[in-house]
């Protein structure tokens, strides 16, 4: 048996010398190291040997197997190196050719609109105030004059968050608008200046969430920019002047505006502001649906109840608030017909801005 193992080793190593490609090496491995090889047959026959022969033959068979595997590995490395050398000799790199242009990113169209809104209101003395996206029912609805079971809540389908403890009429939710930030900002302001709080002028940008069917005109998430001004002697005229000034700075000095009566629980009186269609000049087109006007925001005087909930005495202080959607403004300015483009991460769309 030992002589047979020696002959197998000599034959296998001799057959390995002329092997010079992967296919031939694979065939060699099957023949001399495969399950049906003579070497493996000897391993299978160890059980039939005597106690004296078994350790001797087993040790010799392992030595032969190790030797053949080592020789096979060396041959495989040699073949791989030869292939690499051939590739390096056959393929040339012309370093004088011009390189490919590096594709750089760009600012998202919504971010561009947001930055422009920040700039315009910053020039008018407004500061940016950030508020949280996970809110309580109290701040998102109740303190904004939306009592439980108020019918206006149906206009804002809400994502509620499951809590470990029963919160009753004050569950956690994803904010449906940035208006809760008004209460946070006013309470912080009145706690800091409890006696005679100075005027406050802020804008509150952020992401909002509503449980809606996704269409070309609506999404379950969207940006919103809230505005708030509170002080002594603030009137609806101040609201109209501020927003008309914003429209001229945003859409051009020739921009026309109009205010239409509306209703929001947290403002009284309430209005919606339109701007003259900047695509057709007011003549009527598909974007303005022939009306010549585009609705860009809702606004109104802060409701006395909301002022009181924010720590301001409504007998002494007054204020106005407004809210606008940057995606909507961007869609109107660039004639974008589907709001889903903003969230699809399609470079063909984003590269246009």
Image (cartoon, rainbow, N blue to C red):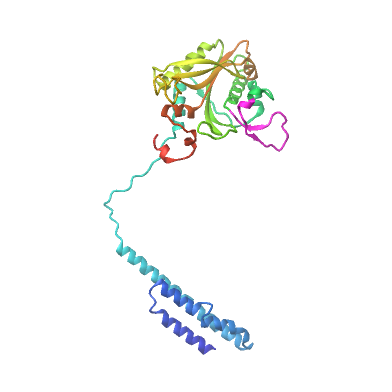
Q: Is residue 175 left or right of residue 247?
A: right
Between 116 and 273, the one lying in front of the other is 273
Q: Residue at coordinates 56% horizontally, 84% vertically from top-left?
A: 42
- Residue 68 sits above or below residue 181 on the image: below
* Stretch of the chain drawn in magenta: 153-176
Q: Position of residue 308 (x, y in %)?
A: 64, 17
Q: Residue at coordinates 42% horizontally, 37% vertically from top-left?
A: 349
Residue 33 belongs to the span the image colors magenta: no
Q: Is residue 16 left or right of residue 147?
A: left
Between 188 and 204, the one lying in front of the other is 204
Quarter assignment of residue 284: top left
Q: Position of residue 128 (x, y in %)?
A: 51, 25
Direction left: furthest residue: 96
Q: Is residue 150 left or right of residue 203?
A: right
Q: Position of residue 332 (x, y in %)?
A: 44, 27
Q: Position of residue 189 (x, y in %)?
A: 59, 21
């Amino acid at each position: 048996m030992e002589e047979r193992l020696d002959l197998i080793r000599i034959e296998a190593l001799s057959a390995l010398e002329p092997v010079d490609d992967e296919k031939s090496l694979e065939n060699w491995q099957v023949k001399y190291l495969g399950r049906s090889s003579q070497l493996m047959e000897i391993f299978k026959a160890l059980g039939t040997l005597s106690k004296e022969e078994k350790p001797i033959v087993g040790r010799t068979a392992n030595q032969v197997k190790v030797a053949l595997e080592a020789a096979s590995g060396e041959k495989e490395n040699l073949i791989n190196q030869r292939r690499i050398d051939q590739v390096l000799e056959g393929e040339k790199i012309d370093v004088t050719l011009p390189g490919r242009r590096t594709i750089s990113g760009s600012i998202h169209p919504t971010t561009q609109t947001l930055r422009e809104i920040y700039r315009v209101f910053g020039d008018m003395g407004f500061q940016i105030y950030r508020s949280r996206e996970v809110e309580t029912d109290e701040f998102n609805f109740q303190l904004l004059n939306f009592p439980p079971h108020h019918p206006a809540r149906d206009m804002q389908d809400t994502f509620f968050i499951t809590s470990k403890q029963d919160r009753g009429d004050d569950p956690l939710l994803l904010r449906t608008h940035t208006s809760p930030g008004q209460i946070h900002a006013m309470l912080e302001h009145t706690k800091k200046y409890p006696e005679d709080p100075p005027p406050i002028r802020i804008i509150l940008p952020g992401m909002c969430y509503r449980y809606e069917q996704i269409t070309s005109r609506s999404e379950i998430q969207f940006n919103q920019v809230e505005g708030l001004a509170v002080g002594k002697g603030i009137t609806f005229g101040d609201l109209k002047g501020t927003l008309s000034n914003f429209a001229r700075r945003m859409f051009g000095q020739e921009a026309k505006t109009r205010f239409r009566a509306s209703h929001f629980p947290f403002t009284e009186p309430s209005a919606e502001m339109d701007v003259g269609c900047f695509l057709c000049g007011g003549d009527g087109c598909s974007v303005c649906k022939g009306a010549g006007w585009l609705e860009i925001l809702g606004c109104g005087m802060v409701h006395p109840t909301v002022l009181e909930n924010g720590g301001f005495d409504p007998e002494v202080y007054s204020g106005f608030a407004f809210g606008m959607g940057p995606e909507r403004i961007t869609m109107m300015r660039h004639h974008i017909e589907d709001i889903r483009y903003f969230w699809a991460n399609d470079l063909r769309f984003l590269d246009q801005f």
